[in-house]
Amino acid sequence: MSFERSAYGALVLTLALSLASALPGSADSTGRKGKAIPERPEQLSFPTLDFEIPQGDRYRHSIAGSTPAYVVEDHSLPLVNISVRIRSGSYLDPADKPGLAFLTSSLVRRGGTASKKAEDFDEEVEFLAANIGTASSNSHSQAFASCITQALDSCLELFFEMLREPRFQLSRLEVEKARLLEGLKQRNDDAGDILDREWDWLLLGEDYFVARKPTADQLTSIQPADLRDFHRRSWRPEGMVFTVSGDIDTKEILAKLEHYLSQWPEVAADLPAWPPSLPTKKPQPGLYYVDKDIPQGKVYIGHLMPQVTDWDNPDLAPLRVMNEILGAGGFSSRIVQRIRSDEGLAYSAGTNYSIEPLWPGSFFVSYQSKSSTVALAAKIALEEIDRIQREPVSPSELETAKNSLIQTFPRRFESANQIASTFAFDQYLGRSHDYWHKWRGQMAKITAADVQRVAQKYLDPSQFLMLVVGKWDDIAPGDKDARATMKEFFDGKGQPLPIRDPLTLQPQP
């Protein structure tokens, strides 16, 4: 045997002995500071999490008179993050041009600037090794930039030129519209997309901006002039909230922002209406289905929830805990345990409760199951909703749900960028920063009676809508053991919804 092989064998033996001595049950089964390592995971103990929530007002500043900016310094790395949230979004889309806010936001970044073609702008961003982008949602648009500290001045110059004077280059607009049109063609390929679309329409109506979907003709009709007009009216400093974090000096960056905002052209028009209007449609409870030839059914069961207008509402925290116990808490939640773990009826199952401040939220159960067991899974889900209304949750369920929400809370503030963004969104919504300081205390006080009370108050199965996408002839009869059929829900009166043409959204023959 060679010396090298002999030495290698000795090294492996030494490492193996070292590892063995550190394992539980070994001669020296101790952890750090000489503490014995427990034999089972549930015997582990951890110190109480000590986390102080930052004071939001400490980071708030006003620039250019009244535009808010949240600045959080972090000199651990030579990096800077800049973001601006803008009072724009799809709530401002004209009824005949859904998608205008999205395309405007996209082309602000991808369509060049007044002095630079799109290709030249891209090249300069790449030369700086910066990241500059935009995004849009129902309630706002956003632009962001990140770069190394040494490139900050050049990055800011590009960033504000993009915000202030977008070119909306026609060639880039055509590319973006072509990409979106390809997506429209695939609308019916995934049953989940059909489920989401029809669910939004059942709850909010086809014309409400949150649920509105563009047709191919509407999308192709959007031209650069539409983007310029939309940008001029809504991408304005008066409706902006800035965040800056990273390796910056607060006074210096505020002066730079002030400089760039002072160059913004004035617009002789009112700011867009705020907040968005509420939906006028009243959802109709019942069983709805879209007949699609797939081997399983995809299902939503639920209803609208009240819009959040009071962030001090004492019901908000218990509602979060109720949702966590019922179906949002993963494998520890009731619906997941019964539908997936106990019965094996679905790979994915759970509940969703959206807390919405600008329009009504919703609560719904979601799952997908093979066709014959769709009805059984629905029956189990409704049983669990009934049980959480009839009887108090157990102490262990309550503590697990509360601790999960409390212990993960600090993630909202784990970086300078998240601190700035969280408080900036408060500003955008008109929510007090004190909301976060009360949050854990409110959560810790929740009792089983609180959970039962909000379940009884806010969940109303008589008002539920059930939407199923799948092969209805296979779903309706239920399982072979006759444990449940679709006739058990809403007197068995299912209302068929049509498969829509993906480009026109008209019912297909």
Image: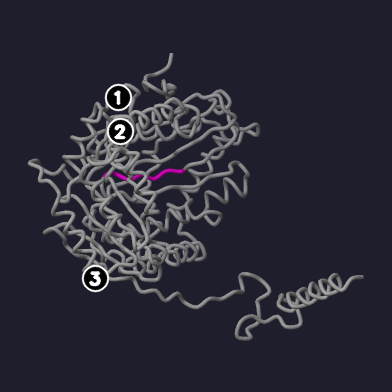
> Label 1 to label 2, Cα distance in Å?
8 Å
Which class describes the residues within 10 Å of circle 1: few (<14), some (14-19), or many (20+)?
some
Give x and y (percent) for residue 283.
32, 34
Residue marked by disc 2: 99
Q: Find numbered disc 1 in the image and state the secondary structure of the residue it sits on.
A: helix
Contact (CB < 8 A) between labels 1 and 3? no
- In this view, 491 is above or below 359: above
At label 2, the amino acid type is Gly
Residue 376 forms part of the magenta stretch: no
- In this view, 25 is above or below 102: below
Chief secondary structure of the magenta portion:
strand
Residue 364 forms part of the magenta stretch: yes
Which class describes the residues within 10 Å of circle 2: few (<14), some (14-19), or many (20+)?
many
Residue in front for this viewpoint, 151 or 133: 151
Query: Looking at the rendered structure, which numbered label has been put on residue 218?
Result: 1
Residue marked by disc 3: 58
Q: Which residue is situated farthest in the top direction here?
A: 509
Give x and y (percent) for residue 209.
28, 35
Query: Which numbered disc flags the more N-terminal residue, 1 or 2?
Result: 2
Q: Classify the position of the N terminus by image quarter.
A: bottom right
Could you say which quadrant of the image residue 146 lies in? bottom left
> Label 2 to label 3, Cα distance in Å?
38 Å
Left or right for 345, reference 247: right
The magenta segment: 359-365
Could you say which quadrant of the image residue 20 lies in? bottom right
